[in-house]
Amino acid sequence: MNGFGDPLSEIVRGIRSGNRRMLAKMITLVESALPEHQAKAQEILDELLPFTGNVVRLGISGVPGVGKSTFIESLGMLLIQQGKRVAVLAVDPSSTRSGGSILADKTRMEKLSVEPNAFIRPSPSGGTLGGVARKTRETMLICEAAGFDVIIVETVGVGQSEVAVASMVDFFLVLMLAGAGDEIQGIKKGILEMADAIAINKADGDNLERADLARKDYQNALRLLMPSSAVWQPSVLTCSAIEMKGIDTIWETVLDHRAKMMASGLLMQNRKKQAVAWLWSLIEEGLKERFHRHPLVQESLKACLAEVESGKTTPAAAATRLLDLLDRSR
Ligand code: GDP
């Protein structure tokens, strides 16, 4: 028996009591493509929702090789020493591989992966970014209901995955390297808008001075580029993930941000906004799926595309015709 036949209440109870087998089972349910699994997962998620939210949701991004897994291992161990429970998840739609590394890979977080208070789950594989992000969001909620205190979501510093992760976390940390080309030119405004902090990693050995210079450059760039907020000014820090230096300061920054966001009411406001944006993206995705699945659309789509290509009809007219089919059934 695969266990998915367990009564709902038993699964909910199991997850809430921190039963790892149940937790893993539930995540498999969320990741399943089968409609009956999806339906059951949604039902259980609704039951779990009241027990979520009391966590720190931390997103971590950076190019492959910047030291994400080393950093997460160091931060994770620090948090565990403080008596916290830590879950590490990932969003990577590119077949879960980026530059040869698998995000949230247990073998790359050797110490953390054997800790009973840590839970590491690699990115769900396959599918669109939207699909992968949805599964990770739901897995995050399950981990929250299971009593984890900190949820770390890892992603790669390229493209839309960062946007997806930034829109599911409370704090978005971007890891960078010193001397990787011209510092300032390398920063994209989009990243700065998302980052709550930038950490220059590998600030150790010969690299220490360069890392500090890079920190100052980034700090200046941030001041120039970013509008000032009364509540939070993104900070630029240095750290050595491998030597576990500066990791505590970064964690204190996360907590400081949290305290300020909570006091101003922005934390909850931000989460509400994220939930509504998520709702809309699910609706848009669902509509698209319904469109492509509709038998009349399937019948006419090819001909409509050909008519637009050959200039027989305008894209607008063809779109209206196809969309009108949604209101019709055979
Ligand atoms: P990821 O691809 O971003 O997850 O990066 P990894 O954590 O796998 O690290 C890539 C390489 O950089 C590995 O060889 C690490 O040992 C090394 N590395 C990571 N953090 C540091 C650091 O703080 N200092 C130094 N010197 N090397 C580091």
Image (cartoon, helix red, strand yellow):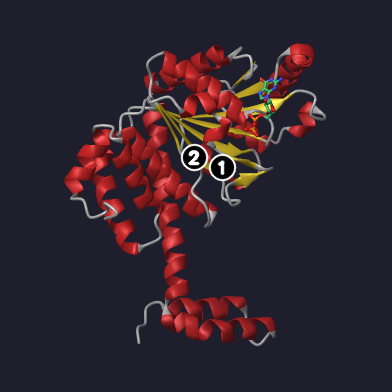
* Ligand 1 - quadrant of the structure image: top right
In front of the other: 11 or 44: 11
Cα distance between the residues tagged 2 and 1: 6 Å
The quarter of the displayed image where residue 21 is located:
top left
x then y, percent, for residue 274: 43, 41
Whether the residue under disc 1 has CB within 8 Å of ligand 1: no
Is disc 2 in contact with disc 1, using a CB cutoff of under 8 Å? Answer: yes
Determine whether 82 is above or below 188 in the image: above
Whether the residue under disc 2 has CB within 8 Å of ligand 1: no
> Label 2 is placed on what type of residue?
Ser
Tell me the residue that label 1 is attached to. 163
| Helix, strand or loop under label 1 | helix
Q: Which residue is drawn at 42% across and 82% down?
A: 295
Horizontal side, residue 66 vs residue 134: left or right: right
Determine whether 214 is above or below 269 in the image: above
Horizontal side, residue 312 vs residue 88: left or right: right
x then y, percent, for residue 129: 54, 52
The quarter of the displayed image where residue 302 is located:
bottom right
For mark 2, does the 10 Å Cα neighbourhood hold few (<14), some (14 to 19), or many (20 or more) residues? many
Q: Residue at x 27, y 40 (%)?
A: 49
The answer to whether any part of residue 230 appears in the image is: no
In front of the other: 110 or 265: 110
Q: Residue at x 36, y 35 (%)?
A: 143
x then y, percent, for residue 296: 44, 83
The answer to whether any part of residue 305 appears in the image is: yes
Horizontal side, residue 28 vs residue 107: left or right: left
x then y, percent, for residue 35: 34, 63
Determine whether 3 is above or below 59 in the image: below
Tell me the residue that label 2 is attached to. 167
Q: In which quarter of the image is the N terminus?
A: bottom left
| Helix, strand or loop under label 2 | loop
> Label 1 is placed on what type of residue?
Val
